[in-house]
């Protein structure tokens, strides 16, 4: 993967509140948010299983993440060495893709969503959250939240190596935003209320679809441009795609359960197994078409 040195991120799409505090110290209430690469429910279970009640129990770090307001302009020759600047470009690419693809595929206008970079804790439209939740999308305020130190844990604890794992994580969360815009999330909420015994199966289908949508974006990443028409990516290799697929597998419910020392129980899955997540990222990438992401077949 190679980013274009001349591409300019749309910094208006990001709110950088790192170092600003802003959390009450309690994990996001279960059910308050919808969708995350690890899952809010899974994150809380792992925290409690570890005997603590905060981000450091999962991630073991300070939750630092650098300083806010990084200089991500093209005038800064070192900007692509900054994780925040790279992520701003990823976000610009993902939203540029959906800006054109959502109306073409579904006849629905795309509404951009902000991403919030935070450290340790943050207040959201879904309640107070800490880093232990992992990256997530909050439907009430239509924002993606991420503590950028999550990427270190993705590599060091989960073994998801390769830089393209980072845009995959963001593309998954923006997949939830697409689901929100299409009304898929609201439909799943109604189904879960009507059939609570199948709640986990609906949740898995929702998460796997977000994985598939991330794969669809990956297929077209090199076609996306900044506001001036400059390509954002100059290359995305087969190894990059494999890195995204590998990352999806490392955060499968079965893998997370094993890491936490819990019994693997497929009936308790909320995001899908490693194999399922890898399958749907691959499906999205190979098709390049969001309409191929029918993870709800047989459920709805």
Image (cartoon, rainbow, N blue to C red):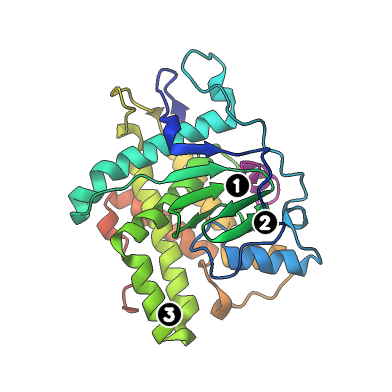
**Which quadrant of the figure contains the C terminus?**
bottom left
* Image-quadrant location for residue 249: bottom right
Which residue is identified by label 2?
Answer: 132
| Depth order, front residue of 297/28 | 28
From mark 1 to mark 2, how far is it between C-alphas? 18 Å
Residue 243 image offset from top left, x and y in percent: 52, 44
Q: Is residue 269 above or below residue 43?
A: below
Residue 227 image offset from top left, x and y in percent: 31, 26
- Identify the disc placed on residue 192: 3
Say if the magenta span includes residue 150: yes
From mark 2 to mark 3, how far is it between C-alphas? 25 Å
Q: Secondary structure at mark 1?
A: loop
Are there few (<14), some (14-19), or many (20+) residues within 10 Å of tag 3?
Answer: some
Nearer to us: label 3 or label 1: 3
Residue 241 image offset from top left, x and y in percent: 44, 43
Q: Secondary structure at mark 2?
A: helix
Residue positioned 32% across, 57% down in the render: 181
Q: Secondary structure at mark 3?
A: helix
Q: How many discs appear?
A: 3
Residue positioned 67% across, 56% down in the render: 132
Which residue is identified by label 1?
Answer: 160
């Amino acid at each position: 993967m190679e980013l274009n040195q001349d591409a300019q991120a749309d910094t208006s799409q990001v709110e950088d509140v790192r170092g600003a505090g802003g959390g009450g110290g309690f994990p996001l209430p279960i059910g308050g948010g919808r969708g995350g690469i690890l899952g809010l429910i899974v994150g809380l279970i792992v925290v409690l299983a570890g005997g603590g009640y905060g981000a450091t129990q999962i991630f073991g770090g300070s939750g630092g993440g650098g300083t806010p307001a990084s200089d991500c302009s093209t005038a800064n020759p070192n900007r692509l060495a900054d994780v925040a600047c790279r992520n701003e470009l990823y976000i610009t690419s993902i939203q540029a893709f959906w800006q054109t693809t959502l109306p073409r595929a579904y006849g629905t206008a795309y509404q951009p969503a902000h991403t919030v970079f935070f450290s340790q804790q943050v207040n959201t439209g879904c309640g107070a959250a800490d880093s232990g939740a992992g990256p997530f999308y909050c439907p009430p305020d239509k924002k993606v939240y991420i503590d950028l130190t999550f990427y270190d844990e993705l590599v060091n604890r989960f073994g998801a190596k390769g830089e393209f794992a980072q845009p995959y994580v963001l593309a998954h969360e923006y997949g939830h935003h697409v689901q929100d815009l299409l009304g898929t999330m609201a439909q799943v909420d109604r189904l879960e209320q009507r059939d609570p015994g199948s709640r986990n199966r609906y949740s898995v289908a929702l998460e796997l679809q977000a994985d598939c949508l991330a794969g669809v974006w990956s297929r077209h990443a090199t076609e996306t441009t900044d506001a001036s028409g400059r390509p954002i990516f100059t290359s995305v290799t087969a190894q990059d795609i494999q890195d995204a697929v590998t990352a999806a597998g490392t955060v499968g419910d079965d893998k997370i359960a094993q890491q936490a020392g819990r019994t693997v129980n497929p009936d308790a899955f909320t995001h899908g197994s490693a194999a399922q997540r890898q399958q749907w990222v691959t499906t999205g990438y190979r098709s390049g078409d969001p309409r191929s992401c029918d993870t709800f077949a047989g459920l709805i």
